[in-house]
Image (tube, rainbow, N blue to C red):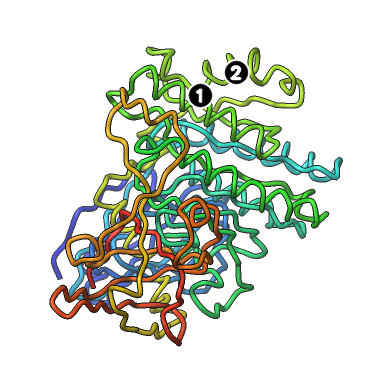
Amino acid sequence: MSVGNIEQAGSISTDYHMEDALNNNNEHLITIPREHELKFQLLPDQQLIIEIVYGIAEIFGTELANNIKYIFNNQDIFSIYAVDKTQLKWYTKESAVEPMITQSPNSAYAEYKIKIYNLHFALDKMRFTSSQGPNVLVIGGKNTGKTTLCKTLVSYAIKVKNFTPLYVNLNPTDGIFTPPGCLSATTIYDILDVTAPNWGQSATTGVTTIPSTQPIIKNFGLEYIHTNYSLYNTILSQLSIVTNSKIMKDPLLRRSGCIIDTPSLLDKSDMGANEKEHVNKIISQIIKLYNVNVIVILKEEKDDEDNSNNYEEIIKQQLTSSLSSIKDSISLLTLPIVKKSNVVEIDDVYKRFLQRVAIRDYFYGNSLNTVLSPYTVSSSFNKLTVWEPVVYNNDTDEDKNEEPKLEPVTVNASNLQHAIVAITFAERNADPDTVLSSSIMGFGLINEVNDTRKKLRILIPVPGQMPDKALILTQYRYLE
């Protein structure tokens, strides 16, 4: 076995010698002091098994049971936080390179963790004292830990009491319970699967060992919001109509509230005045549509240098202008972020990996728990109607202020090979406005396109013929 990259702070003790570990089925024993965090970064195609010997530890708010083996796979990145002094075992295959292990400086992270605890207790107080629970908007720049905070708050909410918070994902690049390219809202009934990079499985990926989650899905299809702000606003509004209706019909869900995860709206380097105006409108619209009463801003120290890219300043300005009528009902909290201590920066390679995992799980299931058998169907070119969202490429494009549009796609290999398509409920000959407002039946993966025979093969998750419905081409591809 070759020894890989290992970084360990002196305060984390390792109760083994490397030579002994190599001769003992590669079993490693580590003791984590109280209020310390241990970060693991796996290599591609690497498997890691973790078992808590004693103590209290959690991964993104979900407590790990003692003497239970947790299996992690495929370049996953995760952190184990020791609520109390914890000893754990970890194993890898004998031929594997050891994972990278690092420890965050405990002072900065401990302060941040205390603020998360206090936030959770404040949210729980709202749940206990009012029939309208907390609707929390988490907002911040790139790699500030927005999704991690959302996952932690959701996990804490279901930990003790029978709450069922609604997790709302407004970042289309994240495939959380869905393939990437979607905005979604998912009621969380039970503990999250800590071993899954994308939170776990949903009803769209087959039978699970824990109660199934059924997300409400709206397809955006594009990778970047700034390529069509009008479409994003439309999909945002469509999702809110369905989720608000669900919340109003379910008293427990209304009391549990929702946790809203957002994309990094201000991180485009060449963002002009027109695009910043669109971003302001999006933030304001999210707050209004989802009846937000708590706003959590994850803020780096450098955000103070440029107020134009400062979420805190933008929201404060909105609370005195477009949101002035509801400002008294909104609580604003800023959590300072020290990236080296609080956040593992995710690069584009890992982001693509998570997207591939989400697509693979949708069609094939999780290889550890659920294996699905999708179906391949054939179709002729003339039996398909495919649309795609209009993409705008620059800040000066006047059309960005128009209504969102779909344009027809020519069915051929260059456009559709290995593409993910959304299958709508709209009839194949429906007009583009009807297609855009239609709900999504599911997704298909176009595996093969034969321009000579005018035939293609599509992978779908259920048996039967290809539905005679309109398709929307997304920007995501998957090569098996």
432 over 236 or under it: above or below:
below
Residue sitting at x 39%, y 82%: 374
399 over 379 or under it: above or below:
above
User: What x and y, as percent, mark residue 407?
Assistant: 35, 50
In terms of depth relative to the viewer, which is nearer, 344 or 50?
Answer: 344
- The residue where tag 2 is placed is 318
Pointers 2 and 1 in contact (C-beta within 8 Å): yes
Quadrant into which the C terminus falls? bottom left
Q: Residues within 10 Å of mark 1 (few under 14, many from 20)?
A: some
Residue type at numbered disc 2? Gln
Element type at mark 2 = helix
User: What x and y, as percent, mark residue 63?
Assistant: 58, 59
Compared across the picture, whether 64 is left or right of 461 comes to: right
Compared across the picture, whether 127 is left or right of 337 comes to: right
- The residue where tag 1 is placed is 280
398 over 445 or under it: above or below:
above
* Among the 4 quarters of the image, the one containing residue 113: top right
* Among the 4 quarters of the image, the one containing residue 451: bottom left
Q: Tag on residue 123?
A: none
